[in-house]
Image (cartoon, helix red, strand yellow):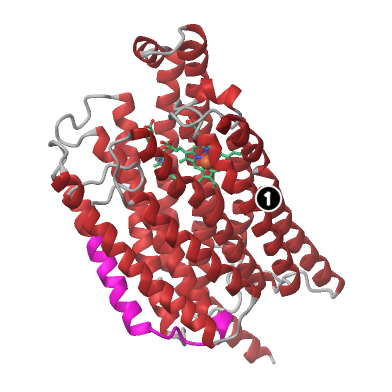
Amino acid sequence: MLTDAHLKYESQKLAMNYFRVALVLFGAQLVMGLIVAIQFVYPGFLFEIFDFSVARMVHINALVVWMLFAMIGSVYYMIPDETGEEAVGIKLGKLAFWVLTAAITVVVLVFIFVQVGSGSEASIWFINEGREYLEAPRWADIGIVAVILVFYYNVFATYIKGKRTGIMTVMVANLFALAGLYLCGMFFTDNISMDQYWWWWVIHLWVEATWEVFVGTLAAYALIKIIGAKREIVEMWLWIEVLMLFGSGILGLGHHYFWIGTPEYWWEIGALFSALEPVPLVAMFVHVLYDWGKEQGHAEAKGDAKVINNTPAMAWIVANAFGNFLGAGIWGFFHTLPQVNIYTHGTQFTAAHGHLSFFGAYATILIAMMYLAVQGAYGIKRMTMTFKTKMSLFLTIFGVLGMAVALTIAGYEQVLVERADLGGGWDAFFTAQNLPWYIQAQGWRLVMGIVTFAGFVYLAWDLLTIGAVESAQEESEGAAAAATA
Ligand code: HEM
Ligand code: HEM
Ligand SMILES: [Fe+2]
């Protein structure tokens, strides 16, 4: 991550900058998560110094922002490979990067320093727009839109100028939808049902439609790079997934419209279409593992099984296939029918699903892209796992799974005690939170959060050092081979 010496294109160098900021924000996200988790167990922690609500807000906004940075980085990294061209508006692109990074920094500082106060038109513009995950104030919202327009121009114009692969075609169309949806979270209405109605267009149609298609394009690209998968095969899968994801994902939106004051027909629509959502996730899973197995088979037939030229990235892609299926597919499906959701809605069960899905479906593949970029930046032919790579894989995956299990147990207790037994309501909410199953589960979440954080430390350390280590090793191997020849 420390150099970009071997990258030929400015677009890819810019990508490295996006990845670097993404990594820093990822770390900040986890620190905030730890603070919130401590406050669950010891409610007096940082009392009146750093509010639960603010730490939680920074935790999940930093999550969204680091992922967007890593996504933009991934696109800038792929553009030259896929189109054969330098990004056309690269100067503007570089400027946009600094503007975006500065704006995000200001927004976070304001969140941290202005924690309490009344809400007004001015606070919407300058402090906080008040929509979970998208809390940036309006000035920043407008700035973000401007920066994204520059980014989109770069992607689109380069696509038109260069080779138009299937991967890029899907990418360009999908990014248009992804960016356009952001606008749905930018206007304010006094009616909370209406406000939530539109807010879900961003949140749900991002993570369950456009982001999923986006990671489909990344997986397709990465599989070609890492194992030399056949383009026709990965692109065929990609088109199938696009069709299915948009099919189930768009009307699947209904699973957020059960209890917010929208008409009751959403019960049936939400139940049916969101229940179908795991189908494309299974297809993605099959896609990655099938391609991998197939390429491995070809290679073995040729007597060379070592076709994986970046094992850290490949390991994270496999983690992605499993994680997406488990976190989004299984944990999502659990609570997606209105008959179930009436009990689980807004419990820790939701948080279990939120963690497992965001990590499994998105963090994993974006980390894989970072390893690919490091390989390119150091000019390494075949990158292998270091001890740190293995530690980071093990600790983050084990930690996040552990957190999800703990939260699932807490959620289960809430369903039984708060909802089923006591019939919901204010008192029931607090009774359920004070029983041992809940308290112990929150304790375990904290422990597993620390494990996750330790994994992150290894990850950052590895990303910063693996390039130098592996290129030195390759050089010495090359020298040894030359000496024996
Ligand atoms: C990678 C894809 C996904 C991500 C990142 C994701 C993430 C999330 C998050 C963070 C929430 C909580 C939102 C809030 O704060 O209120 C949520 C809610 C929900 N998700 Fe997902 N999700 C994904 C896919 C799915 C899928 C495929 C399904 C169903 C098959 C699903 C079903 C649900 C339901 C029913 C809720 C509402 C929970 C409640 O009523 O409290 N999700 N999701
Ligand atoms: C150090 C590890 C982490 C800890 C201790 C932690 C802790 C927390 C806590 C305490 C909350 C508030 C839950 C609530 O209000 O009930 C939360 C929310 C959330 N965190 Fe984390 N987190 C960690 C890592 C992550 C990771 C790696 C991701 C995803 C990649 C993530 C995604 C989320 C999401 C999406 C929410 C909102 C969930 C919802 O509203 O349903 N967190 N986290
Ligand atoms: Fe959803």
Location of residue 380 with respect to 123 vertically, above or below: below
Judged from the image, the secondary structure of the residue bearing numbered disc 1 is helix
Q: Residue at left 71%, top 67%? A: 234
Q: Total of numbered circles in the picture?
A: 1
Q: Main secondary structure of the magenta part?
A: helix
The residue drawn where x is 21% and y is 58% is 139
Percent x, y for residue 40?
Answer: 33, 27
Residue farthest right in this picture? 301
Whether 476 is among the magenta residues is: no
Q: Is residue 119 above or below residue 183?
A: above
Report if the beta carbon of the residue with label 1 is closer than 8 angstroms to ligand 1.
Answer: no
Along the line of sight, which residue is nearer the eye, 92 or 219? 92
Q: Tell me if residue 293 comes above or below residue 473 in the rendering.
A: above
Residue 348 as seen in the image, left or right of residue 119: right
**Pick the front one: 37 or 153:** 153
Does residue 111 appear left or right of residue 172 in this picture? left
Quarter occupied by residue 430 = top left
Q: Is residue 257 above or below residue 300?
A: above
Which amino acid type corresponds to the residue marked 1 in the rendered image? Pro
> What's drawn in magenta, residue-wise?
81-103
Quadrant into which the N terminus falls? bottom left
Q: Does residue 207 appear in this view? A: yes
Quadrant that contains the C terminus:
bottom right
Q: x%, y% of residue 355?
A: 48, 40
Q: Nearer the viewer, residue 103 or 407?
A: 103
Q: Which residue carries the number 1 mark?
A: 280
Q: Is residue 394 visible?
A: no
Q: Residues within 10 Å of mark 1 (few under 14, many from 20)?
A: many
